[in-house]
Amino acid sequence: MLVLAPFWAAEWYRTPFLGMLIEPNNIVSQLSSPGWPARSNGVIFADRLLALNDQPIPNASAYMDFLQQNGTKPVLASFTRRAGGAFQLTIIRSLIRRWGICLLCSSCLISLALHFWASGFGRTPCAGNSVPVMLCWFSQPR
C-alpha cells in the first residue's frame, strides 16, 4: 500500500476538486478545511449530492468521473439536506492544489524508507523494528 500511495496521490492531484469530499453513499464527508469552495458556499456534513450540471450522480465513482470530464469549469450542484429540502449552488473549482495529498505521499515514502532502514534493508527477517525507530524519531524534541 505504501508503494502505491504516490501513484494514488498523483491521480488525486490531477483530479479537479470542488471543495468537498463525498462518501460512497453520496453524503458529504465531515472532513473539510477552511476555504474549500463547496463548504464555503454552505454545503455541510450529511448533505446528499444528487446531481452535477443536471446529470444524476448515483455514487462516488460517478462523481469522480464527472470531475475528470468537466475539468475546471464551474459546476451546478444539486443537494438535499438531511432534515429535508433541496438546494442548488454553483461551485467554482479551487485553483489551490491540495497540499495535504502531497504531504500524505511524502509521509508514506518516509515511512517506507524508515521501515527498510530499521529492518536492515531486508537482512533481518523481522521488520517489526521499524515501529520503535519511527516512534523514537518522531518523539525527539526539535
Image: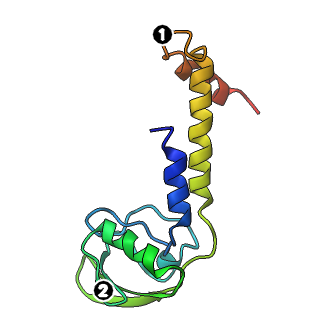
Q: Quadrant of residue 28?
A: bottom left
Instruction: Give residue 94's position: percent from left, percent from top.
Output: 58, 76
Instruction: Give residue 54's position: percent from left, percent from top.
Output: 31, 90
129 horizontally vs 27: left or right: right
Q: Alpha-carbon distance for marks 1 and 2? A: 53 Å
Q: Are marks 1 and 2 in contact (CB under 8 Å)?
A: no
18 horizontally vs 54: left or right: right
Instruction: Give residue 137's position: percent from left, percent from top.
Output: 66, 26
The amino acid type of the residue labelled 1 equals Pro
Numbered circle sitting on residue 86: none
- 87 or 55: nearer the eye? 55
- 27 or 109: nearer the eye? 109
Q: Is residue 115 above or below residue 79?
A: above
* Residue at 37%, 66% in the rendered image: 22
Q: Is residue 4 above or below residue 91?
A: above
Q: Is residue 49 above or below residue 134?
A: below
Q: In what element is the residue under mark 2? A: strand
79 horizontally vs 134: left or right: left
The amino acid type of the residue labelled 2 equals Gln
Label 1 vs 2, first from the N-terminus: 2
Numbered circle sitting on residue 55: 2
* Residue at 38%, 64% in the rendered image: 29
* Residue at 56%, 48% in the rendered image: 104
Residue corresponding to mark 1: 125
From this viewpoint, which residue is outermost toward the right? Answer: 142
Mark 2 burial class by Cα count in 10 Å: few <14, some 14-19, many 20+:
few
Mark 1 burial class by Cα count in 10 Å: few <14, some 14-19, many 20+:
few
